[in-house]
Amino acid sequence: MSEAGTGPGRDWRPARGVLGVGVLAWTLVVGLGLGSLAALLVNAPEVAFDTLWRDPYLSGVLRFSLLQAGLSTLLSVVPAIPVAVALARRPRFPGRRLLLRAMELSLVIPTLIALFGLVAVHGRQGWLSTLWRELSGEPLGYLYGLSGIVLAHVFYNLPLAARLLLQGLERQPEAQWRLVAQFGLTRRAIWRCLEWPVIRRLLPRLMALVFTLCFSSFAIVMTLGGGPGATTLEVALYQALTYEGDLARAALLALTQLAVCLALWALALRQGGGMPLLATGDAARPAGRWRRRDARGLSRLVDGVWLTMLAALLLPPLSAVVIAGARGLPALPGQSALWPATLLSLAMALAAALGALMLALALVAAARRWRDRRRALPAGLLEGGGQLILILPAMVLGTGLFLLLRPGLGGDWQSYALVALVNAFMALPFVMQVLQGGVALPVGNARRLADQLGVRGWAYWRWLVWPRLKQPMGLALAYAMTLSLGDFSVIALFGSPSRPTLPMLLYQQLGGYRWQGAAATALVLLLVVVVVFALLDRLSRRRPRYPQSRYSSRAAEAADAGMS
Amino acid sequence: MSRRTLVGGLTLAALCSVSPAQAEETLTVYTYDAFVSEWGPGPSVKKAFESQCDCRLRFVALDGGVGILQRLKLEGEDSAADVVLGLDMNLMAEARDTGLLAPHGVDLSPLALPVDWDDDTFVPFDWAPFAFVYDSQALPEPPHSFQELIDAPDDLKVIIEDPRTSTPGLGLLLWIKHAYGDRADAIWRGLQPHILTVTRDWSEAYFSLFLNGEASMVMSYATSPAYHMAVDHTDRYQAAAFDEGHYLQVEVAARTRHSEHPQLAREFLAFMLSRDFQRELPLTNVMYPAIDLGDGLPEAYSKLIDPKVYTFSPPVVREHRKAWVDDWLRVSTQ
């Protein structure tokens, strides 16, 4: 915030500092990410590249990983298109909010809980199978094998994909929907001029994201795979890191994963536009306020079918978890470890989320600054750096960091700090997506207006940036916190003193035959996730305390929107 | 708002300010997470040992025996661990080879294991045979050998764990290898139609699937029913006794060579074979104690199967594990 210009030719407020901080954050993230890989390689006694590539086991693993991830991606993303279109066309129906919340939840449910719900509904003795037996007398078995894996991945990713597509559709300027209403455009015309262009721009990055998530899936693939034929690279990685203690092999496997996913992302980033990948808060005005000719008649039925299918996919497993958890409620009072664990989890999740948020802000701000100066390459590098962590297996990141920081790791609290750091890194890609999509920093007229009126420094930030920033920031925090809350892989790796986090407690209870307690813990975990989302959503939407701020944010919007 | 912030801050501060006491010696024990949970043996063991040693006992919970060994290897001589507790027999040879462990110097005469034990590095502290646990409501007549299981109708399904990632999974692999030697592949081939799925670890197999009624049998321990009988008060879940005999799981502890408190570590290892320690295990760890508890053994344990047990020696396991896992992979993916 130096004297950097109010003059017309020069850019506004945050000066070089922004770039410096951004580069620093980038160096930290990429340095520690690649550094952890390097640490594995350095600490390995020998590195044998050639034997790895010729290993038929690994080529089988790679083939299967690609197959299941490809199938899961297709089946998650393609049906998400009509679902999103239907949701965009029906801005008001009973239960819409609930459905949207459930869709946001699906990304962050811990695997073990999701598995429990899926088995309770789709398993051999599940609700669906029981129903089917009643009707037809035949048993039903599809949960084990490729179909089960794909089902679980679709359960995780279809709602995510649909949510992001819906977000893209709803962010279309209001004027366009007004025109649609005024011209009474037909279904085909709307699809051709409005929906498809948006979706086409989003699809490549969306598919890359879903593919990456499915590609690195671990517990789901093993449990539902039906046998060792269903092995992903992550399983091989786990083997290498634990039973075989072969750091070099682990590093090489991680490099393989990096290569596959990076190639995909590079492709996707070239194809896709700069649209947000993560759902950000809804626009203030739902697009469907305008009457749409295509929303009448038969389309009601079609939309109804798609939305029912989404609800049928999403709600029963979640209900199963809630019902099982309710049965564990009587065990709640006896669980002295539950509340400290909840507090500890929340504290660590908050630390991780704030860390992720700060890193993401630094990266996004600097990238934007470079974009403003038409320097696409450094901007792309900065943004890409944040995505790196999504592709780097958490186990490798954790073990590598452990090796790097080992001499400094004395007490328990350093372990917790390290876990929070890794969780922050893991949440970073999601946080960046939210911020990139949601933060519409004042541009054009708003900025010119501010310049003319001499609004800068704190006032500029308070009245022009903050109103635009707080909602995405709230949502970013919510995603980051809940992702960390549900995470077990990292904390399991570093170990802990006797105080467990919530997911650790869940695993301990399961390992110790405490089913009732485990069910209750799962329920509490789920509730905490929902509450965090709701609370941060509520807080970030709250109207500013000063009446004039309402005006100023509206004015800023108006300035953004139009008159030149 | 501000008050809530204050309370939150204070809670955080309280959480953060707890640090080990400086005055007395602190013995650091690496173990697995179920051991230190509030219902596990950890808390009462800590209390009992601290009351007699004038020291503090600090547990660090890691991800199973494999996690303990991995951490020890990563840390090497700088490890904070004085004692590692919770390795199993299959990890012993590898752990010994690290050169990081020291002889225990403990009198092993109280041991009452079903096998002879004269190892000078590892102190066994509990044991159980691996076994298939079945749901007697779904399966009143369980098979009593691998052959009977193979011959059963195809709708008899079992859930097993993966030997690449789980201890019971590796246990099953070694069990079949020990019982059938070169014919192990044929047994595995016969079992394939009965295997519902192969899970990553025991929790998913037992909790997410078996107790959800997904299959009538699951690979677990012969002692699992004791918990159901003693705590859940149900004898619905029982272990099937197999004619081939059962493979044995023994959990062990050892002290590290570079410990700063060797004397204390030795005392702790000796304490592990005391009644104070051992009587906690049957219902917390759900394993047989390593010494004869006499009347101290919960009544449910008298209703368990009492099969013939055996193990490979640790070096044999280390030498062949990879090849045997590869064999299993080949047979299972045909």
Image (cartoon, helix red, strand yellow):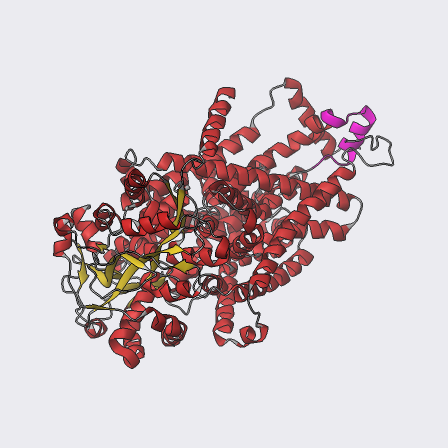
Question: Image point 24% across, 75% down: which residue?
Answer: B179
Q: Is residue A416 above or below residue B185?
A: above
Please give the count of numbered marks on the rendered protein: 0
Asked if residue A354 is among those painted magenta in the image, a careful observer would answer no
Q: Position of residue A498 (x, y in %)?
A: 38, 42
Q: Is residue A256 above or below residue A397?
A: below
Q: Position of residue B45 (x, y in %)?
A: 29, 44
Please identify the quarter of the rendering in which residue B250 is found.
Answer: bottom left
Frontmost residue, A533 versus A28: A28
Q: Could you tell whether A239 is left or right of A358 in the image?
A: left
Viewer can see residue A286: yes
Frontmost residue, B111 versus A404: B111
Question: Image point 67% across, 58% down: which residue?
Answer: A271
| Magenta span of residues | A441-459
Question: Image point 54% across, 59% down: which residue?
Answer: A211
Q: Could you tell whether A210 is left or right of A262 in the image?
A: left
Q: Position of residue A161 (x, y in %)?
A: 53, 51
Question: Image point 51% across, 73% down: which residue?
Answer: A59
Q: Main secondary structure of the magenta part?
A: helix
Asked if residue A452 is among those painted magenta in the image, a careful observer would answer yes
Residue furthest bottom as drawn? B182
